Image (cartoon, rainbow, N blue to C red):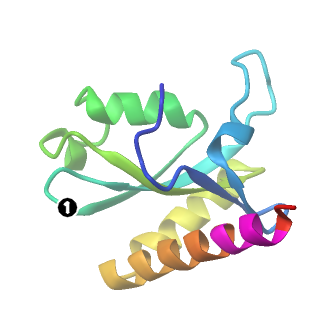
Amino acid sequence: MKITSGLELIISVSSRSVVPWSSMTKSKKDEDLPYFTYILKCADQSLYTGWTNDLDKRIAAHNARKGARYTRSRTPVELLACWSFATKREAMQREYQLKHLRRDQKLALIRSATDSYAKSIITTEP
């Protein structure tokens, strides 16, 4: 599944860096798939936060109206940002933290991650 978001990045907690989504894609045979906490933008412009171990499949489920009850009537959804974690517990803890942020705080967090990613691209290009 191609992610249609303009952001298309993952904030990797283990390395404390922001990396392109394409570099995090793994085959289904990989048993050590990371866990993800993600923020979606719904069709009504609301934000939804969740966690999963298969991001592509979960976004497809949301868009097929088979995901969370909240997103079923708010499709299509678009991935704004996601963070990778080594354990399910870490991903669930981050989801809990994000769900307690106000909308403006979530957008500021996404914006700051995007800005740092853009800066890292600019400084690493020859």
Q: What is the span of residues highlighted in magenta in the rendered image? A: 118-123
Q: Residue at horizontal 23%, vertical 39%?
A: 76
Q: Position of residue 93 (x, y in %)?
A: 60, 65
Instruction: Judge whether residue 9 is colored magenta.
Output: no
- Residue 71 lies left or right of residue 3; in this view the side is left
Q: Nearer the viewer, residue 122 or 40?
A: 122
The quadrant holding residue 121 is bottom right
Examine the rendered structure and indicate whether residue 81 appears above or below residue 78. Answer: below
Please rate how many residues cluster around mark 1, counting C-alpha atoms within 10 Å: few if below 14, some from 14 to 19, many from 20.
Answer: few
Q: Position of residue 43 (x, y in %)?
A: 17, 50
The residue type indicated by label 1 comes to Gln
- Residue 13 lies left or right of residue 65; in this view the side is right
The quadrant holding residue 52 is top right
* Residue extending farthest front: 126
Q: What residue did someone put label 1 on?
A: 45
Q: Residue at horizontal 46%, vertical 37%?
A: 3
Q: Position of residue 5 (x, y in %)?
A: 42, 48
Q: Main secondary structure of the magenta part?
A: helix
Q: Nearer the viewer, residue 39 or 89?
A: 39
- Mark 1 element type: loop
Q: Residue at horizontal 24%, vertical 52%?
A: 42
- Residue 20 lies left or right of residue 104; in this view the side is right
Q: Quadrant of the C terminus?
A: bottom right
Q: Nearer the viewer, residue 83 or 94?
A: 83
Examine the rendered structure and indicate whether residue 120 appears above or below residue 45. Answer: below
Q: Residue at horizontal 28%, vertical 32%?
A: 63
Tally of numbered discs: 1
Examine the rendered structure and indicate whether residue 112 appears above or below residue 118. Answer: below
Q: Position of residue 122 (x, y in %)?
A: 73, 69
